[in-house]
Amino acid sequence: MQEVRKYPYRILHPSMVAIISTMDLSGTPNACTVAWSMPVSSNPPLVAIALQKKHKSTKNIEETKEFVINIPGKPMLEIAKICGSVSGWEVNKFQKYHLEEQPSKAIKTPRIAGSIGYMECTLFAKYDGGDHYIFVGEIKVAEADERYFKETWNENAELIFHYGGDKYGKVVKY
Ligand SMILES: Cc1cc2nc3c(=O)[nH]c(=O)nc-3n(C[C@H](O)[C@H](O)[C@H](O)COP(=O)(O)O)c2cc1C
């Protein structure tokens, strides 16, 4: 066994990539890629995301108390990389990268059209998590593309997994 001193958390990867959409108080939407997300409760239905304190998305969620977890398929890989490297503090990513807003059903924050799964969440709790905040969202509406999801994702769903750094791919088959 080697000791993993650099990026020990990568032992928990690959992790499914999601793009979080949020909105600021003026109604400007933002999109931010995350690999750190997980379910935390089934009743009530809760999910958590870890967001760096400095992100524009963090400020947006603190202000509006809602967010959407958008699940991109492989055709959206480049969008996921861009939304994960450019900050909404600098750029309106929806405008500049031609992301299409799709109205949500239960909250004001829009979805990102073209995604293959959506979870519309209202803020349930916020915890300090070191250099991140852990935002726990209560799922108000969850939808997934019926071509790829029926109770679980099927093998045709080209989900994006992040291994760390610039390494992306499928989950290793066995
Ligand atoms: C594949 C990938 C996964 C990422 N995962 C996270 C994450 O889980 N949490 C986080 O805070 N930032 C994560 N990032 C970095 C943010 O997406 C990035 O810093 C983004 O520009 C922040 O945008 P914002 O300031 O507009 O909110 C990830 C980036 C990539 C490319």
Image (cartoon, rainbow, N blue to C red):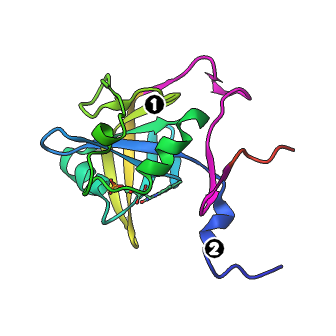
The residue at which mark 1 appears reads as: 118
Which residue is situated farthest in the right direction here? 174
Range covered by the magenta-colored residues = 142-168
Q: Quick one: quadrant of the N terminus?
A: bottom right
112 over 162 or under it: above or below: above
Q: Which mark is residue 156?
A: none
Q: Is residue 141 left or right of residue 174?
A: left
Q: Residue at x 87, y 44 (%)?
A: 174
Q: Residue at x 35, y 62 (%)?
A: 127
Image position, residue 12 (x, y; %): 65, 61
Q: Which mark is residue 8?
A: 2
Which kind of residue does numbered mark 2 sit on?
Answer: Pro
Image position, residue 145 (x, y; %): 55, 21
Which residue is situated farthest in the top direction here? 146
Image position, residue 70 (x, y; %): 45, 36
Residue 40 in sight from this viewpoint? no
Q: CA distance from mark 1 to mark 2?
A: 30 Å
Q: Residue at x 47, y 26 (%)?
A: 114
Image position, residue 53 (x, y; %): 32, 65
In-front residue for pair 125/33 = 33
Q: Is residue 144 magenta?
A: yes
Please identify the quarter of the rendering in which residue 77 is found: top right
Circle 1 packing at 10 Å, graded few (<14), some (14-19), many (20+), is many
- Split into quadrants, the picture shows ligand 1 in the one at bottom left
Q: Is residue 150 magenta?
A: yes
Q: Are marks 1 and 2 in contact (CB under 8 Å)?
A: no
